[in-house]
Image (tube, grey):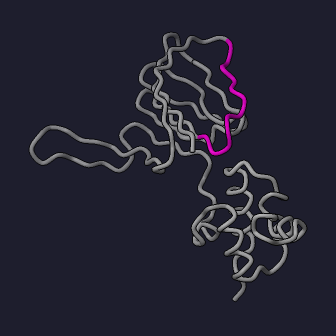
Amino acid sequence: MNPPIEVIAASLVRERTRAGLSLAEIARRAGIAKSTLSQLEAGKGNPGLETLWALCVALGIPFARLFEPQAAPTQVIRRGEGTRVVAEQANYQAILLATCPPTARRDIYLLMAQPGADRVSQPHSPGSVEHIIITQGRALVGLMDAAEELHPGDYICYPADREHVFRALEPDTQALLVAEQN
């Protein structure tokens, strides 16, 4: 059985981009030809175990990560949805919206916006992710080509290393923004 080359190709591109390294640098570190890595990233070829292992070492990732399909780049959780945990001895519940890798850095912001000019953000550093929860008003939020209309209590997560937008659709729109960098 051949390895799922399409998944491996996407994983190699994803991890190399996250590492912020060139094709030539990863190939050099792995001890393989740049053309070999280029073909693998294009989904061509039949890489051997040794080649894949060397690439994982060069990228500083576990071997299994090469076989993980890319997660959906945008996640939306509407108010009242999500994994709910309820306390037994208090009127208290929590809804898990997202987890964070142990090496990530998070900054938390309260956003206040008015309708008018869009807040268009250029791509941040590779691997950056933004989490937004609308607390008041309505907004169009997310990737430029796939923004979502959100209402109070709605949550969205998207890759911030691509151009993205925040457009207030009502006066005095507010949101909580968690910016995550790996």
Q: Which residue occupies 69% across, 56% down? A: 14
Q: Is residue 123 left or right of residue 45?
A: left
Residue at the (75%, 51%) spot, across then down: 21
Q: Residue at x 69, y 24 (%)?
A: 120
Going by the picture, which residue comes out furthest to the bottom?
Answer: 1
Q: Is residue 55 above or below residue 122?
A: below
Count numbered badges in the picture. 0
Segment tinted magenta in the rendering: 117-128
Q: Quadrant of residue 135?
A: top left
Q: Is residue 17 above or below residue 77?
A: below
- Nearer to the camera, 16 or 88: 16
Magenta residues, dominant SS class: loop
What x and y, as percent, mark residue 38? 86, 64
Using the image as rendered, state which of residue 72 and residue 48 is in the foreground: 48
Q: Is residue 118 magenta?
A: yes
Of all residues, the one furthest to the right in this rendering is 35
Q: Image quarter for residue 116?
A: top right
Q: Position of residue 172 (x, y in %)?
A: 49, 11
Front residue of 173/4: it is 4
Q: Is residue 66 magenta?
A: no
| Frontmost residue, 169 versus 6 | 6
Residue 79 in percent (x, y) is at 40, 36
Query: At x 46% / y 42%, what residue is drawn?
Result: 77
- In what quadrant of the picture does the N terminus appear? bottom right
Quarter of the image where the C terminus is located? top right
Q: In the rendered view, tell whether residue 25 sits above or below residue 116.
A: below
Seen as rendered, the residue at the extreme left is: 89
